Amino acid sequence: MKAAFPGSFDPPTLGHLNIIQRSASIFNEISVVIAENSQKSYLFSAEERLELVSALVKPWENVSVAVCTGLIVDFLKKNSIPVIIRGVRGGDFAYEFELSMMNRALNPEIETIFLTTDPAYLVIRSSAIKELASFGGNVSSMVPPEVEAALKAKFDD
Amino acid sequence: MKAAFPGSFDPPTLGHLNIIQRSASIFNEISVVIAENSQKSYLFSAEERLELVSALVKPWENVSVAVCTGLIVDFLKKNSIPVIIRGVRGGDFAYEFELSMMNRALNPEIETIFLTTDPAYLVIRSSAIKELASFGGNVSSMVPPEVEAALKAKFDD
Amino acid sequence: MKAAFPGSFDPPTLGHLNIIQRSASIFNEISVVIAENSQKSYLFSAEERLELVSALVKPWENVSVAVCTGLIVDFLKKNSIPVIIRGVRGGDFAYEFELSMMNRALNPEIETIFLTTDPAYLVIRSSAIKELASFGGNVSSMVPPEVEAALKAKFDD
Amino acid sequence: MKAAFPGSFDPPTLGHLNIIQRSASIFNEISVVIAENSQKSYLFSAEERLELVSALVKPWENVSVAVCTGLIVDFLKKNSIPVIIRGVRGGDFAYEFELSMMNRALNPEIETIFLTTDPAYLVIRSSAIKELASFGGNVSSMVPPEVEAALKAKFDD
Amino acid sequence: MKAAFPGSFDPPTLGHLNIIQRSASIFNEISVVIAENSQKSYLFSAEERLELVSALVKPWENVSVAVCTGLIVDFLKKNSIPVIIRGVRGGDFAYEFELSMMNRALNPEIETIFLTTDPAYLVIRSSAIKELASFGGNVSSMVPPEVEAALKAKFDD
Amino acid sequence: MKAAFPGSFDPPTLGHLNIIQRSASIFNEISVVIAENSQKSYLFSAEERLELVSALVKPWENVSVAVCTGLIVDFLKKNSIPVIIRGVRGGDFAYEFELSMMNRALNPEIETIFLTTDPAYLVIRSSAIKELASFGGNVSSMVPPEVEAALKAKFDD
């Protein structure tokens, strides 16, 4: 069974990698899908995020990476992927629940499954990491070294 | 008893119509109140929303529509409407609870009552519909045909 | 429009009275419905609760009291009452949401509306009041004087 | 990949069947695990539940049923099943989150994945169904006909 | 400033010790208060819990232990302790919020403060530990060795 | 023990003052820390907020005020303050929980404690107050007179 793990990955975090690793042992193939919405602004461009995530998932043979500029459900249909994977904390479940319903309304053949965020990564959100990094805070316990370097490069500009 | 159903209605959805229909059978008169806040940006202008909602509520004789550019509580006082109706899902109740307290602090004579969103419409949020429509997604199960046409016209511009 | 306010009322609290008072100004007639479930144990018998509540609602001409030993939806159908009123805090909304869906599944013509518990009564739950009273705690800010006396009588036994 | 769907199934509902059906199309093999805890009381015995569930899952070739009288994680280890499936509504996620953490603390190799309850079945809880049936309420929209008959037989005793 | 940390401690867990340790570095004196409610049933008697907790808190000079058979607020008043400490996860906050309001209604001079449960201990609840231990599950990562031995002795009876 | 009460205070509210007053009776010294983030826009400048808050906390001898333009955890370290105080309602706890975990990840020696918002102030949020004031709404029950005057001056510009 194939599954997709969609997200902004702006930047990818240790929490994302944890979900990818666990998903890769449940499903035959995992497609990490980087969402690129022209109406949102990102710290890292789609190309930069593709490069960062691609480097991080190299260890897993059954994980690939792609950029999606349209609806996730359309991407999944075109690529014959029937399952969406989402990591959830506690407080964001109501939102995730609605999102999964929305995707199901758009394509009833697509199933969303949730994995719980490992408590060790509960605290890690891309948005908070960017804010921290902008203040020069130490994010080494939250992102892989490659991402830490990329953040440093961004904010030293 | 008169009641008001305030919201942005940008655009009106099948979920809104469901709440209006159910409210119209509980209260003698329903005033659908389109909030127009000069500090927010809308996809449809207040005039367009007034036109769309007015067309949709025609079937109910006891439902009228108005635009409100100030505080809802002031609008209700001026129009002698003592009850606010709000539809709630699960995840948004904390916010709705606070909003109702705020309105009560501003005018203790105004009561907010909540109707639960019908499960069939749980997934339908105006904001998500706009995003979907901007990607060319199919929103025919979420909005009335008039609104679908209006969305198409907006995004084909 | 008629509406019912069902509950255990074991015992009735100031929070219950607050909901009754507010409901009585929205609806033409309010029926306070005391649920009596043979599989649950109560501190006050159905007769005692009927007597206590009846005494408390005397000030409102449009409020009556009844005991219901079956399904609430059946009681409402028999008495041609189309609306159920429930007071909600924040933390109990998920449960109330499901309960309202359940009642709707049993009878689609019955509508549940929610009123928010007044912050002054947020703390007042019948179960906590019974526990407090059993320890001799002062519950005078939580229940009417009649109920306080009844509790005292119960626990002095 | 094998997965287990544990629960009390007292009785099995249309909501359970919905989760089983969806799981059966994601995983190669599904084991429905009927929990039997000697400290809890059930309406239907473990044997009755085994019989009811077995009859219901016959249409799916890759679904089997078993009774578990010990810890679920031990059952999964013995049967080499690495994944637990749970259906979630919104309001019960905090509990489910903790339960999944607990199971992970007991065996880090076991992964819990969550499927959202279909809105059509949001209202259906085994406990509520039993209460309804005990009052003679109509539960035909909540359970399969076999279960409805079994409930009738129980409460006509 | 003195503070109390009330609870059932049936049995005490590593999560409890974590809260005690952190509280002991914030407040001058911590009183661990073991609640004994004659209407509840415990696995360990009040004496056993007192002994277990007393042994565990020996390392901290400013932590003492007591048993309370009445209302916590009365215990605090008698002992001139103005602050209650509670550990919270996410899902139980609504309950804890109400409990703190209740205690404040009983004695406005008493303040409840909340510490977040360390993610490492999120999974640890006394009730789950008892269930696990009754099945012979391994609870060594959830309770101190003394408590593990006490649980073993209980369930080997 | 010293403690910090960080926030935007844009503007300070009666709810803020309530938390400050209660904190000042628990801790020896309270530092009210006005966060100034160059990427956020405020109604009142950092200087205006410093002036407003300083005037309001004059009654308490053990309360001081400071502006922080960097990370709160860095401010606390430099000032040897080991405790962060946060007021919580119900609906915002999930966010506050994560924030406290984040601060702990940045500095494990810093502890966050939560006080519950007094029900009388549940409704008061700085953001809502600004919106109300911009519409000319009456905010006298939500902010001290000094702040009401400052708001009036802002919106009469």
Image (cartoon, coloured by chain):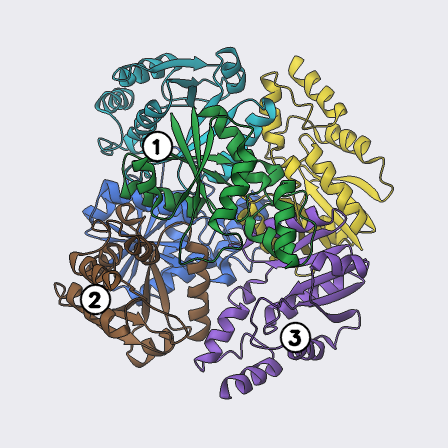
Chain colours: A blue, B cyan, C green, D brown, E purple, F yellow
Residue A128 to residue B38: above or below? below
Same chain check for tags 2 and 3: no
> Which percent across, then down, holds residue C83?
37, 33
Which quarter of the figure has residue E81?
Answer: bottom right
Q: Amino acid at mark 3?
A: Ala
In the picture of the structure, the residue carrying the numbered disc 2 is D53
Helix, strand or loop for disc 2: helix
> Which percent across, then down, holds residue F24?
80, 46
Residue F137 to residue F88: above or below? above
Name the one closer to the observer, E97 or C64: C64
Which quarter of the figure has residue D69?
Answer: bottom left
Is residue E34 shown left or right of residue D154?
Answer: right
Q: Chain of mark 2?
A: D
In the picture of the structure, the residue carrying the numbered disc 3 is E46
Q: Is residue E115 visible?
A: no
How far apart are labels 2 and 3 at the CA level? 44 Å
Name the one closer to the observer, F50 or B84: B84
How far apart are labels 3 and 1 at the CA level? 51 Å
Is residue E145 shown left or right of residue F83?
Answer: left
